[in-house]
Image (cartoon, coloured by chain):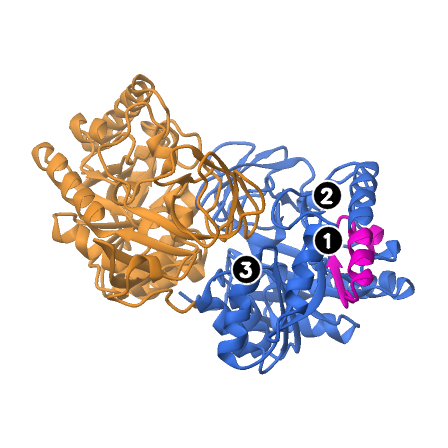
Chain colours: A blue, B orange
């Protein structure tokens, strides 16, 4: 259920209840400004991914700096954004359930909405929803550019689906979804360059083959925080879908050449037990800090490791662990699932709580 | 924020929206009955752990079968239970923050509440909260019986804290918290027997030394789903704190001698992309099914593995993967963090939705 906020505006950071999701507003705004400045000379637009932030408050700040809108993975996320004032949303994922597609059709009356397909049956399901709602829905074809997850092969299989969409009186062909997820966290830059070079070839070829059939790819979307500079420079992608850049996390920081953004997202935790020398147990375990991409880091304690995560306990080990009752900032291993554990961002600046932003799409998995 | 329920009572299971947290009510009731029957001859009481189920609806069903109350790890969980009608709650964990202890003192006016300490400073903090509220609070001493996390050493260090509590006009010494967390998932039964034998020695010694000082351990609490039969048979523990037994998960099923309970908890997911032969991608990734204890299992598809979890995608591989748009039951890797991702249990029996139970303490981390 919805949790009460752990802080009030004006409060000092050390008085915030724990665990709490802190957003360092100076670092966050720096990251938004930096991305806008990096993309401006390329002509490639930003359509930041809301699966990271789950909040129209954040989306509108991204749009104020030039983003064309947001992506989501789920219809429920799209609803939270549109109902919060975001006017242009791409569900960068397949949606197959008629109940979900009916919701998406309803949503497309109040916002510009598009969705992806990688199968004839998926297109037919979207077509049925659009026809039932009495409107036209925009569909992008997802191509598999190297991750081996969803998406058809680039080239003729993708073009065939594009033609199927364009031929429907209930649908609009919107372009290509071409995201290389597994390239984002490759540690060595040359691995990322090679992966995106291959993705570029397949995507460019598909765009050209579509054009030969008279089909314009208005959107060619993809890229994440680990590779966006490559897609933006390629001349093929029109929109960058990075999400983590706004917050950053411990996993992106482990890339050999970390992206040029500051750590803005933290979980504030408190030491609730310090049973032996060199051991401190904090009140934030893996329910507070999912460990799918590794353990959190202990900010400001270089000799201390967050060594073990249990449901509600995090065990810190090392020289100079924080003392009993001390509060510490933890850097999440992975920002996306961490945000999704909380109902509120506690925005802090210069040691004070400045704002509480609701995480409107928290838990929006459907 | 709070999510809408994915189902309505009376609906067929195959019409439930995905992802959804399904509770197979026949299996769930079997598990509750089985635990009550196993503990009855031992004389050891059940105080089931609500960190697993997060719901007073479940707690009251456990109590109807003889449980004395519930444990929680967090004050917010204790609030959700007490406000939902659970009359007897042990916070089986240290609480050090004055703001949280003030809430716990307030709660002890409407329910029987106890909390743990493993440090003189922690006891002083509880004492200050009790004095400020004008009531007496019950405190258990947590001892480290082998997990190496929180807790003082058994024997004299624990007895010294017990005497400190008993000497306070604002506190009541409630007994010992003696939980061996890391023993629960040891795969071989002889490893669990050895771990609990050592825990029994330390716990029995501490109880006896307390008694020699005139201090009665009214509660000696501990044990989980992996070892409860050992603690219940020891004659030392008075209360068993198992939680997972009600639901079960893939990790407990990997023990060499799995506990005698049925799988009652599932995540219903839908195949949203089937891009290649032998591959199906479902709409439930690690945000829907945390992977801290390994991957989920695909129920009813013995040749199919849930091979990779991304934020919102689960990739199924193998012979005979489910087809596009098919819905499948997934067995969570770890029930506790999985439940905490959802706002609603969808209770199902014989293929129909029977009830929707709110997960009142979902996200209650503070």
Residue drawn at 59 percent across, 82 percent down: A110
Question: In the image, is residue A229 part of the stretch drawn in magenta?
Answer: yes
Q: Gap in Å between the C-alphas at discs 1 and 3? A: 25 Å
Per the rendering, the mark at residue A122 is 3
Q: Are marks 2 and 1 in contact (CB under 8 Å)?
A: yes
Q: Residues within 10 Å of mark 1 (few under 14, many from 20)?
A: many
The magenta region covers A203-231
Instruction: Report the disc number at residue A183.
Output: 2
Q: As drawn, is B102 to the left or to the right of B263?
A: right
Question: Do badges 1 and 3 share one subunit?
Answer: yes
Please say if the residues under marks 2 and 3 sit with CB atoms less than 8 Å apart.
no
In-image side of B203 versus B148 (left or right)? left
Q: Quadrant of the C terminus of chain B?
A: bottom left
x and y, in percent, of residue A197 in the image: 83, 44
- Residue A79 rendering spot, x and y as whole percentages: 54, 73
Is disc 1 in contact with disc 3, using a CB cutoff of under 8 Å?
no
Are the residues under marks 2 and 3 on the same chain?
Answer: yes
Q: Chain of mark 3?
A: A
Query: Which chain is disc 1 placed on?
Result: A
> What chain letter is assigned to the residue under label 2?
A
- Binning the other alpha carbons within 10 Å of mark 2 as few (below 14), some (14 to 19) or many (20 upward) gives many
Query: Gap between marks 2 and 3, in whole Å?
Result: 26 Å
| Tag of residue A224 | 1
Mark 1 / mark 3, whichever is N-terminal: 3
Q: Nearer the viewer, residue A224 or B69?
A: A224
- Distance Cα–Cα, label 2 vs label 1: 9 Å
Q: Which badge, 2 or 3, is on the more N-terminal residue?
A: 3
A195 falls in the magenta region: no
Tell whether B142 sits left or right of B18. Answer: left
């Amino acid at each position: 259920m919805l949790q009460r906020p752990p802080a009030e505006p004006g409060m000092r950071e050390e008085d915030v209840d724990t665990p709490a999701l802190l957003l360092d507003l100076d670092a966050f705004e720096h990251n938004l400004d930096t991305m806008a400045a990096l993309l401006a000379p390329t002509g490639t637009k930003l359509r930041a991914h809301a699966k990271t932030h789950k909040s129209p408050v954040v989306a509108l700040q991204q749009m104020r700096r030039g983003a064309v809108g947001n992506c989501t993975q789920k219809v429920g996320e799209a609803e939270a954004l549109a109902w919060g004032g975001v006017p242009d949303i791409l569900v960068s994922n397949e949606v197959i359930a008629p109940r979900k597609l009916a919701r998406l059709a309803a949503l497309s009356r109040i916002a510009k909405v598009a969705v992806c397909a990688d199968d004839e049956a998926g297109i037919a399901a979207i077509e049925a929803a659009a026809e039932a709602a009495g409107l036209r829905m925009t569909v992008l074809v997802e191509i598999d550019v190297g991750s081996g997850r969803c998406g058809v092969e680039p080239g003729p299989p993708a073009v065939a689906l594009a033609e199927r969409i364009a031929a429907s009186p209930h649908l609009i062909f919107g372009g290509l979804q071409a995201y290389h997820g597994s390239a984002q966290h490759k540690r060595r830059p040359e691995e990322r360059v090679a992966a995106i070079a291959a993705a570029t070839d397949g995507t460019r070829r598909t765009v050209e083959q579509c054009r030969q059939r008279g089909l314009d790819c208005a959107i060619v979307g993809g890229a994440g925080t680990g590779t966006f500079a490559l897609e933006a420079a390629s001349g093929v992608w029109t929109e960058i879908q990075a999400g983590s850049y706004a917050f950053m996390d411990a996993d992106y920081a482990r890339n050999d050449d970390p992206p040029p953004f500051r750590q803005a997202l933290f979980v504030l935790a408190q030491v609730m037990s310090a049973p032996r020398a060199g051991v401190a147990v904090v009140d934030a375990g893996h329910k507070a800090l999912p460990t799918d991409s590794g353990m959190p880091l202990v900010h400001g304690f270089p000799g201390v490791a967050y060594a073990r995560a249990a449901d509600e306990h995090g065990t810190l080990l090392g020289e100079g662990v924080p003392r009993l009752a001390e509060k510490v900032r933890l850097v999440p291993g992975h920002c996306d699932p961490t945000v999704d554990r909380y109902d509120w961002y506690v925005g802090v600046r210069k040691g004070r709580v400045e704002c509480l932003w609701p995480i409107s799409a928290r838990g929006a998995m459907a």
